[in-house]
């Protein structure tokens, strides 16, 4: 009798253990399912955030996701975290705070190189063109000067025969002693364009519609000629703007604008822009030139009083004086 009771009690204990195990496994499954649901919801929110970010900048690898009018309003704009202002404030500061380790964690150091307003403009212009990155300049001709500074002596430029006269002046006068070579050709005649290409051609400048004759160039065809020559193609889209013309979709490497004109729209602001489709050496050099051109003459002039002093060592007197413009 006692043995039967022990066996019965043992069976009950085993059944209870099995029942508890089943309950525990069921709870584990429910907990696992709940965790999976939470994970899926979180990943869904991340996907939504990524999609919202793409829409915020107004572009993807295939071009604008939003209507271009919407992109023009929203790209580069953010709510001011300090005040909640929906319109970006004007940042007047010339310098920005360093962290204790000497770095600039907010991404800004000196306003000549970058500041929040300039970056917002560059993001907007890049988004409008469907490009990777943009640089803002003080004028359209400043873009020309920066690109010319990025070329090497002996490099050849191909440009339209009715190109904006300012480009002729910059290349022919300002950079007359730089060793650059330039040929002007009718860009509407593809045979002439091909014939004008040289082994040293590094930059093909296209202006369409052209200023002042309003000639229209076949962007895709000229871009293909430039690629075969291992040259970088740049389209001046000032007259058309990104609203009417999409150079990157035609194979152009970089787009420039005199934002003083149609992008500015009201004859009350002067500026220029360079937008690139991808990383390239000429864009990087233009980025450096945008601040270098302002710095170097002042470095030289800072040494002029020292060079003029009779007390200055002979070596100091060899400092080159660079006139300011």
Image (tube, rainbow, N blue to C red):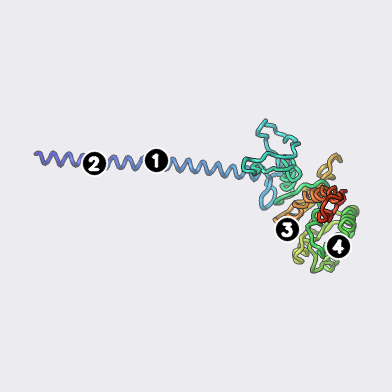
Work out whether mark 2 precedes mark 4 in sequence or the reverse, and give the earlier one. Answer: 2
Task: Tell which of 198 and 285 is nearer to you.
Answer: 285
Residue 279: image location, x then y, percent: 70, 56
Work out whether mark 2 precedes mark 1 in sequence or the reverse, and give the earlier one. Answer: 2
In this figure, which residue is indicated by the disc labeled 4? 182
In this figure, which residue is indicated by the disc labeled 3? 281
Residue 34: image location, x then y, percent: 44, 40
Give the distance between the C-alpha atoms of the residues marked 2 and 4, in whole angstroms: 94 Å
Work out whether mark 3 precedes mark 2 in sequence or the reverse, and give the earlier one. Answer: 2
Q: Is residue 177 left or right of residue 87?
A: right
Q: Callout 3: helix, strand or loop?
A: helix
Asked whether the beta carbons under mark 3 and mark 4 sit within 8 Å of each other, the answer is no
Work out whether mark 1 precedes mark 4 in sequence or the reverse, and give the earlier one. Answer: 1
Can residue 311 be seen here?
A: yes
Q: Callout 1: helix, strand or loop?
A: helix
Q: Name the front one of labels 3 and 1.
A: 3
In this figure, which residue is indicated by the disc labeled 1? 30
Residue 285: image location, x then y, percent: 75, 55
- In the picture, the disc for residue 15 is 2
Q: Name the front one of labels 1 and 4.
A: 4
């Amino acid at each position: 009798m006692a043995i039967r009771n022990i066996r019965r009690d043992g069976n009950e204990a085993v059944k209870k253990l099995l029942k508890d195990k089943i309950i525990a496994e069921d709870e584990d499954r429910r907990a696992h399912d709940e965790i999976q649901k939470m994970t899926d919801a979180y990943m869904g929110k991340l996907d939504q955030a990524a999609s919202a970010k793409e829409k915020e900048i107004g572009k993807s690898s295939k071009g604008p996701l939003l209507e271009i009018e919407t992109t023009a309003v929203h790209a580069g704009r953010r709510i001011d975290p300090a005040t909640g202002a929906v319109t970006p404030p004007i940042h007047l500061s010339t310098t920005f705070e360093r962290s204790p380790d000497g770095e600039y964690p907010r991404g800004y150091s000196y306003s000549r190189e970058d500041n929040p307003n300039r970056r917002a403009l560059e993001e907007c212009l890049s988004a409008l063109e469907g490009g990777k990155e943009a640089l803002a300049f003080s004028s359209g001709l400043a873009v020309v000067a920066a690109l010319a500074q990025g070329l090497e002596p002996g490099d050849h430029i191909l440009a339209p025969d009715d190109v904006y006269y300012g480009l002729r002046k910059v290349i022919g006068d300002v950079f007359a002693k730089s060793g650059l070579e330039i040929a002007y050709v009718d860009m509407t005649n593809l045979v002439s364009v091909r014939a004008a290409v040289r082994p040293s051609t590094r930059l093909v400048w296209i202006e369409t519609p052209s200023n002042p004759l309003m000639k229209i160039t076949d962007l895709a065809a000229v871009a293909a000629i430039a690629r075969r020559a291992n040259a970088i193609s740049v389209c001046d889209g000032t007259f058309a703007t990104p609203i009417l013309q999409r150079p990157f979709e035609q194979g152009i490497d970089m787009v420039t604008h005199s934002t003083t004109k149609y992008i500015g729209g009201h004859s009350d602001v002067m500026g220029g822009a360079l937008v690139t489709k991808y990383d390239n050496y000429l864009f990087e050099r233009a980025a450096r030139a945008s601040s270098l051109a302002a710095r170097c003459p002042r470095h030289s002039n800072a040494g002029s009083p020292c060079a003029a002093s009779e007390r200055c060592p002979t070596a100091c007197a060899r400092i080159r004086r660079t006139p300011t413009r």
